[in-house]
Amino acid sequence: MAKKKIYKLIGEKMIKTAINFDESLVEILKIEVKRLKKLARNSNSTEAFEELQKTNNLIRNIILALTITDERIRIGIDLCMDDNET
């Protein structure tokens, strides 16, 4: 019985943590997309293109991190569901 509760607590904590992390990533993503748009309008030099490339890579990494947190939410749900099934 205690094992089931532990799994449920771990699952809930994983979900809450992943959601908080997602919210932070989304805020960063919004800022970086705005920055990317601004850089795209003003990209006249090699330095601007390099900044554009760095920002684009950061956005790609944020999207990858969102995918990872999605997996954590799924695992958290599985842990909570296991509690109900057994």
Image (cartoon, helix red, strand yellow):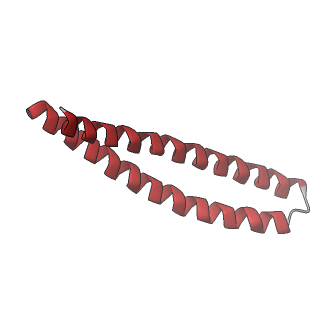
Residue at left offset 43%, top offset 52%: 21
Residue 86 point in image, percent of width and height: 17, 31
The one nearer the camera, 70 or 52, is 70
| Outermost right residue | 44
Left or right: 5 as drawn, with respect to 19: left
Left or right: 74 as drawn, with respect to 64: left
Residue at left offset 82%, top offset 63%: 40
The one nearer the camera, 2 or 33, is 2
Residue at left offset 53%, top offset 63%: 27
The quadrant of the picture occupied by the N terminus is top left
| Outermost front residue | 85
Position of residue 24 relative to residue 81, above or below, is: below
Number of numbered callouts drawn: 0
Q: Quadrant of residue 8?
A: top left
The one nearer the camera, 73 or 60, is 73
Q: Quadrant of residue 64?
A: top right
Residue 23 point in image, percent of width and height: 45, 59
Position of residue 78 relative to residue 55, above or below, is: above
Position of residue 76 relative to residue 22, above or below, is: above
The one nearer the camera, 79 or 47, is 79
